[in-house]
Image (tube, rainbow, N blue to C red):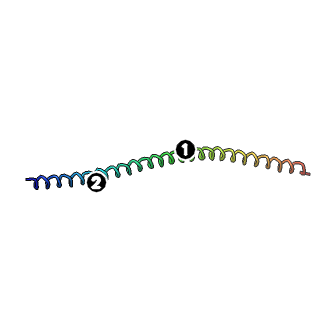
Amino acid sequence: MDDQVAKRFDRLENKIDKLVDVMASMARVEERLIGQDARLKRHEFRLDEGERKIDEVAEATKTNSFVAKVGTTLVSTIWAGLVAYLFYLFRD
């Protein structure tokens, strides 16, 4: 009778040991998932920051393009006026 009880306790201990190993493995997997989630949030934040900066650069580029067009037109107009004035002075 004691032999059967001892075998049952041994099997029970083996099952408990396996259960402990499985629980430890699950804890490690959960820690990895938490770490991956944190990295994913960090990457999302960095992507959002990059997108915001790209939008700022696009807006600045649009403004600078407009200023360059106006400046080019203004310089061309002044240059054409100077050339016309020189021809007017030397028309004789």
Residue at (20% x, 53% y) in the render:
13
Residue 52: mark in rendering: 1
| CB contact under 8 Å: marks 1 and 2 | no
Is 61 or 46 nearer to us in this picture? 46
Residue at (38% x, 51% y) in the render:
32
Q: Amino acid at mark 1?
A: Arg
Mark 2, Cα crowd under 10 Å, few <14 / some 14-19 / many 20+, is few
Observer-side mark, 1 or 2, equals 2
Is 44 or 81 nearer to us in this picture? 44
At mark 2, the secondary structure is helix
Q: Position of residue 43 (x, y in %)?
A: 48, 49
Residue 38: mark in rendering: none
Quick one: which residue is furthest to the right in this view? 92
Mark 1, Cα crowd under 10 Å, few <14 / some 14-19 / many 20+, is few
Q: Is residue 48 left or right of residue 16?
A: right
Q: Measure the alpha-carbon separation of dots 1 and 2.
A: 47 Å
Quick one: which residue is furthest to the left in this view? 1
**Figure disc tally:** 2
Q: Amino acid at mark 2?
A: Asp
At mark 1, the secondary structure is helix
Residue 21: mark in rendering: 2
Residue at (63% x, 47% y) in the render:
61
Q: Position of residue 57 (x, y in %)?
A: 60, 46
Is 26 or 72 nearer to us in this picture? 26
Q: Earlier in the sequence, mark 1 or mark 2?
A: 2
Q: Position of residue 50 (x, y in %)?
A: 54, 48
Q: Position of residue 39 (x, y in %)?
A: 45, 49
> Splitting the image into 4 quarters, where does residue 4 fall?
bottom left
